[in-house]
Image (cartoon, rainbow, N blue to C red):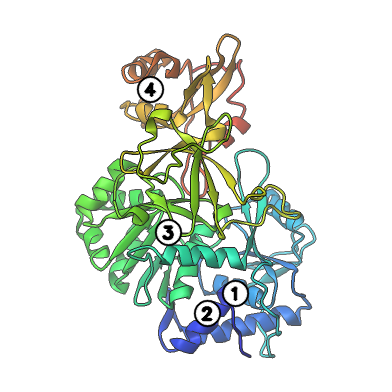
């Protein structure tokens, strides 16, 4: 069967044709060339057809990183199915919501389990030696339903088309230097069920014919050893990974393994959450690698901006929009574009942060099932993220628009307060949320997890914060938790704190 197009299985087919004997995947003891992977994708596509699944039906895949994930996902796409990637950490109620909302006809999952919410389960990717179905490629049909946690409510399925996914691959590969080249060996420790690992990870590997070095479960010391033995040259990462690698070196009492792991790395990137400046600096000083930070969102497939786009590596900076992506900073009240759109060489910071709006062919087609919430009639999408440009025109993230706290009409950005609170010696981690206040409209509440064996009072935290922050930004109450809830990408989940009832005005401070 011949296949032409820009879908992920079409890119695998092209790599098999042009670089058939070249390594495609390293996953534990399993190693596949592009020709071998392509043949396995054919068998999986035929397996779905043998189960009676027709083009357009949804298949949920809940598997860890590995060749099974690739076979299940790429095979489904080659059979014309829509893939619903599922977080491997989902509980049964969370899984049931995704299966019911997407109308999935099949769940591919590891192990032997009964049907979930009436959906039959396949223990691993199906396979058949018959000829795979001939499915004409339509770049604008849904390829993935990527369920996003959002800030409130249940996850929604972002409809990602083949065309949008391919557009973001091309935008990333237009950067100088490109994040992936054909001769690269790319560490894929990011989960493939997340769009970052899916498209900015494996998507770029397939588009270039590079080699993916898959990690099924992230172990800091083990992944450092793997990087050294496999001579990894490209690392798409997230802040928790870099923090864990530095911590592993601290635990070992030496940076030798850290430096050995990054010895062959020509490019390392970070996204999914802001990378702390001290981590960026430590990686440069201790691992001898510069981390290029980026910004994106599921609805943009996912990358929007990168310091690679401006050519200036800076800590706590997301750089400029990718080639082919338009970006504006809009006033958070009127949501109108400014004269300085954040991508020019002007400063613009004196106006305060603006909300990031983006436009480009990489944007999603709205949320399942009817495309609601997609780009507006002019193609622009509000991201809900706030940023400002520095004197070079490079962007710096501030916070989520939905997390902004208005105290007597003044803006309080939680991340700014959290940075100050985290410097207190008793505080391991903090989050700042709004609580109703009859006098000021809203007030600032700090939720903190403490260092082992430490304690802190509200008065002590307030005095610490007041030394660095204006009075209206200083927390008026504090709540102590053993640990703070986190999202998949390592961010503290303020939405989860709100769900726990910590925004009630009658909540007692600890």
Q: Sequence order check: which comes first, mark 1 or mark 2?
A: 2
Kindly state the secondary structure of the residue where label 1 is placed. helix
Q: Nearer the viewer, mark 3 or mark 2?
A: 2
Query: Residue beneath label 4, please?
Result: 455
Q: Sequence order check: which comes first, mark 3 or mark 2?
A: 2
**In this picture, residue 492 sits left or right of residue 126:** left
Q: CA distance from mark 1 to mark 2?
A: 9 Å
* Residue 37 visible from this viewpoint: no
| Residue depicted at x 59% and y 24% | 503
Q: CA distance from mark 4 to mark 3?
A: 32 Å
Query: Residue beneath label 3, please?
Result: 218
Q: Sequence order check: which comes first, mark 4 or mark 2?
A: 2
| Residue depicted at x 70% and y 54% | 98
Query: In x, y percent, where is residue 375?
Result: 64, 50
Q: Sequence order check: which comes first, mark 4 or mark 3?
A: 3
Q: Nearer the viewer, residue 90 or 193?
A: 193
Q: CA distance from mark 4 to mark 2?
A: 55 Å
Q: Nearer the viewer, mark 4 or mark 1?
A: 1
| Residue depicted at x 58% and y 53% | 299
Q: Nearer the viewer, mark 4 or mark 3?
A: 3
Q: Quadrant of the N terminus?
A: bottom right
Q: CA distance from mark 3 to mark 1?
A: 23 Å
Q: CA distance from mark 3 to mark 2?
A: 25 Å
Query: In x, y percent, where is residue 445?
Result: 50, 21
Q: Sequence order check: which comes first, mark 4 or mark 1?
A: 1
């Amino acid at each position: 069967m011949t296949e032409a197009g820009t879908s992920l299985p079409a890119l695998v087919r092209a790599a098999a044709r042009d670089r058939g004997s070249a390594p495609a995947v390293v996953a534990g003891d399993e190693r596949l060339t592009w020709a071998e992977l392509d043949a396995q994708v054919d068998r999986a596509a035929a397996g779905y057809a043998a189960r009676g699944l027709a083009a357009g039906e949804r298949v949920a895949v809940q598997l860890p990183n590995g060749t099974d994930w690739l076979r299940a996902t790429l095979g489904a796409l080659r059979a014309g199915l829509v893939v619903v990637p599922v977080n491997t950490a989902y509980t049964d109620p969370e899984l049931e919501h995704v299966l019911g909302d997407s109308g999935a006809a099949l769940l591919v999952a590891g192990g032997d389990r009964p049907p979930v919410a009436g959906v039959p389960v396949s223990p691993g990717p199906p396979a058949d030696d018959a000829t795979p179905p001939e499915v004409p490629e339509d770049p604008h049909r849904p390829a993935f339903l990527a369920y996003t946690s959002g800030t409130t409510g249940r996850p929604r399925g972002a409809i990602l088309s083949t065309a949008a996914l391919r557009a973001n691959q091309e935008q990333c590969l237009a950067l100088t230097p490109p994040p992936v080249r054909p001769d690269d060996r790319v560490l894929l420790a990011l989960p493939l069920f997340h769009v970052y690992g899916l498209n900015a990870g494996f998507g770029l590997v397939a588009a270039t014919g590079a080699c993916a070095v898959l990690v099924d479960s992230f172990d800091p010391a083990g992944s450092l050893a793997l990087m050294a033995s496999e001579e990894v040259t490209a690392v798409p990462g997230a802040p928790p990974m870099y923090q864990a690698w530095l911590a592993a070196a601290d635990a070992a009492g030496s940076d030798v393994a850290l430096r050995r792991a990054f010895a062959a790395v020509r490019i390392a990137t970070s996204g999914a959450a802001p990378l702390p400046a001290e981590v960026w600096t430590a990686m440069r000083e201790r691992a001898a690698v510069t981390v290029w930070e980026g910004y994106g969102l599921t609805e943009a497939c996912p990358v929007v901006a990168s310091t690679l786009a401006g050519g200036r590596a800076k800590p706590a900076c997301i750089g400029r929009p990718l080639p082919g992506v338009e970006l504006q900073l809009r006033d958070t009240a009127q949501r109108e574009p400014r004269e300085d759109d954040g991508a020019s060489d002007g400063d613009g910071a004196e106006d305060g942060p603006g909300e990031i709006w983006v436009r480009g062919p990489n944007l999603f087609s709205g949320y399942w099932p009817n495309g609601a919430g997609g780009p507006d009639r002019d193609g622009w999408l509000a991201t809900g993220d706030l940023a400002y440009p520095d004197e070079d025109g490079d962007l710096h993230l501030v916070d989520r628009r939905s997390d902004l706290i208005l105290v007597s009409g003044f803006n309080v950005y939680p991340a700014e307060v959290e940075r100050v609170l985290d410097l207190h010696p008793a505080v391991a981690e903090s989050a700042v949320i709004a609580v109703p206040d009859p006098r000021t409209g809203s007030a600032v509440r700090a939720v903190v997890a403490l260092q082992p064996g430490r304690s802190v009072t509200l008065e002590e935290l307030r005095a610490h914060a007041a030394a660095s922050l204006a009075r209206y930004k200083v927390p008026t109450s504090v709540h102590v938790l053993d640990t703070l809830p986190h999202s998949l990408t390592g961010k503290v989940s303020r939405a989860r704190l709100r769900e726990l009832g910590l925004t009630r005005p009658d909540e007692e401070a600890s």
